[in-house]
């Protein structure tokens, strides 16, 4: 499974210290492998389950969130966390059963289960450097 960065970033300053300003806010993602699946944890607290969107295009999985209309935008004094929209894309291996991907949102974490096709393991080999 590979990650495709879909968010651009540019530098800015807050007082005398650098601050990262993004064209789209990103949600942190952790992925681990179990015996039967990859488990993707998208850390997105304060979001509404109905506004998440998961889609497949070929072997690319996109996880996105669009905030509801009328989302409050206060005049921030300090902002280290965002509940805004994001989009993340991941290239899936051929051994992921894309027909049976499932997801649930609880306690601020979107858990996406990517089941593995039994018996279809990735071939691993070591490449000798000459």
Image (tube, grey):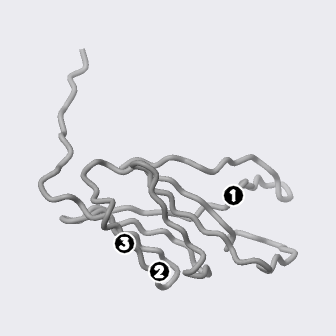
Q: Residue 37 in the image: x percent, y percent? A: 26, 64
Neighbours of disc 2 within 10 Å: few (<14), some (14-19), many (20+): some
> Furthest residue to the bottom?
107
Name which residue lies at 73% across and 54% down.
Answer: 23
First reached walking from the N terminus: tag 3 or tag 1: 1
Q: Residue 112 in the image: x percent, y percent? A: 40, 69
Name which residue lies at 71% across and 55% down.
Answer: 22
Name which residue lies at 16% across and 51% down.
Answer: 120
> Furthest residue to the top?
130
Q: Residue at label 1? A: 24
Residue 118 lies in quadrant: bottom left
Name which residue lies at 20% across and 65% down.
Answer: 36
**Disc 3 from disc 1: Cα separation:** 25 Å
Q: Residue 108 in the image: x percent, y percent? A: 52, 80
Label number found at residue 114:
none
The answer to whether residue 94 is above or below residue 67 is above
SS for callout 2: strand
Give the label, 3 or 2, closer to the camera. Answer: 3
> How many numbered dots are placed on residues in this image?
3
Residue 72 lies in quadrant: bottom right
Label number found at residue 105:
2
First reached walking from the N terminus: tag 1 or tag 2: 1
Label number found at residue 102:
3
Contact (Cβ within 8 Å) of mark 1 with mark 2: no
SS for callout 3: strand
Q: Residue 113 in the image: x percent, y percent? A: 34, 69
Contact (Cβ within 8 Å) of mark 3 with mark 1: no
Neighbours of disc 3 within 10 Å: few (<14), some (14-19), many (20+): few
The answer to whether residue 15 is above or below residue 107 is above
Give the label, 3 or 1, closer to the camera. Answer: 3
SS for callout 1: loop
């Amino acid at each position: 499974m590979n990650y495709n960065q879909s968010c651009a970033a540019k530098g800015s300053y807050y007082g005398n210290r650098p601050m990262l300003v993004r064209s789209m806010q990103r949600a942190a993602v952790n992925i681990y492998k179990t015996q039967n699946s990859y488990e993707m944890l998208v850390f997105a607290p304060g979001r509404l389950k109905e506004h998440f969107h998961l889609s497949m295009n070929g072997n690319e999985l996109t996880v996105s969130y669009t905030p509801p209309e009328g989302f409050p935008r206060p005049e921030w004094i300090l902002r280290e966390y965002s509940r805004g929209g994001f989009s993340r894309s991941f290239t899936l291996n051929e051994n992921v059963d894309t027909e049976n991907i499932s997801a649930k949102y609880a306690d601020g974490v979107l858990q996406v289960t990517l089941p593995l096709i039994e018996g279809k393991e990735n071939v691993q080999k070591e490449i000798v450097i000459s």
